[in-house]
Image (cartoon, rainbow, N blue to C red):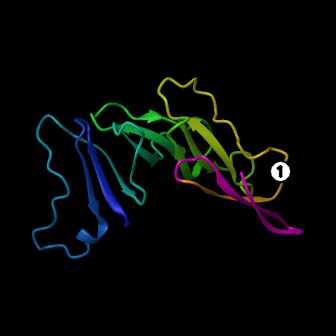
Amino acid sequence: AGSYLVLATRNGIIKKTPLEQFEKVRSSGIRAISLNDEDELAWVDVVDAWQWLPGGKELLWLSERDGWRHAWALPHDGGEPRLLTPGNFDVAEIEGVDEKTGWLYFTASPDDATRLSIYRARLAAGGDGASPPRVTPASSPGHHAYDVAPDGGFAFHTFSTFDRPPATELV
C-alpha cells in the first residue's frame, strides 16, 4: 500500500493515481485528470490511507479545508463533503472505523499538545455539530498510543508517564 494522488471533481469523478507514476515524467507531461466544460476540480490531496465508509458511497478523507485537520465524508456523487469531526482541533490520525456501531475512532490533542487522546465521532449524517467525545479518560495523565482493531471492537492502549514505563492494556 503506497501513497496516491487523489483528485475529485464537482461532478463526482474521483481518480486515484499511485505516486510512482509521477516519477518519470514524459517530455509531453502527464495528464492527471481530464475535465469537461461542465466540471471543475474540487480537491487534490496526497492520500496514504484510502478508505470507503460503510455503504461504499463516501470516501473517508482527512483535510484542512476548514482550517483544521478534520475527517470528512466525501460523497462519490459529487455532493458537498460532510464534516465528521467538528471542533477547534486537528485530527492526528484515524485509528479505526466500527461499522457495526457507526463510530469513527481518531486521535487528537485539543487541550494539550503533549497529550494525545482517542476520540470517537458518529459516521451517520445529521450529527448535532458538537465536539466528539473523548474515549481516553480525562483523568489519565501521560502519553497514550492506540492500536485499534480494524472493526473498532477493541484496541491495545499503551500509556506512560515521565516516571512510569510504558504499559499496554486491552480496551
Q: Secondary structure at mark 1?
A: loop
Quarter occupied by the N terminus? bottom left
Q: In the rendering, at what x and y percent does residue 31 appear?
A: 15, 59
For image coordinates 71% across by 51% down, the residue present is 171
Residue 141: image quadrant is: bottom right
Give yes or no for residue 165 being in the magenta stretch: yes
For image coordinates 68% across by 36% down, the residue present is 133
The vertical placement of 17 against 128, above or below, is: below
Q: In the rendering, at what x and y percent does residue 25 appear?
A: 18, 73
Q: In the rendering, at what x and y percent does residue 127 appear?
A: 54, 25
Give yes or no for residue 64 being in the magenta stretch: no
For image coordinates 70% across by 41% down, the residue present is 134
29 or 105: which is nearer to us? 105
The vertical placement of 130 against 28, above or below, is: above
In the displayed structure, does residue 27 sit left or right of residue 169?
left
Residue under numbered circle 1: 140
Q: In the rendering, at what x and y percent does residue 8 appear?
A: 28, 45
Residue 80: image quadrant is: top left
For image coordinates 69% across by 45% down, the residue present is 110
Q: What is the magenta range?
A: 150-171
In the displayed structure, does residue 158 sit left or right of residue 98?
right
In the displayed structure, does residue 44 sit left or right of residue 151?
left
The vertical placement of 165 against 39, above or below, is: below
The answer to whether residue 67 of the structure is visible from this angle is no
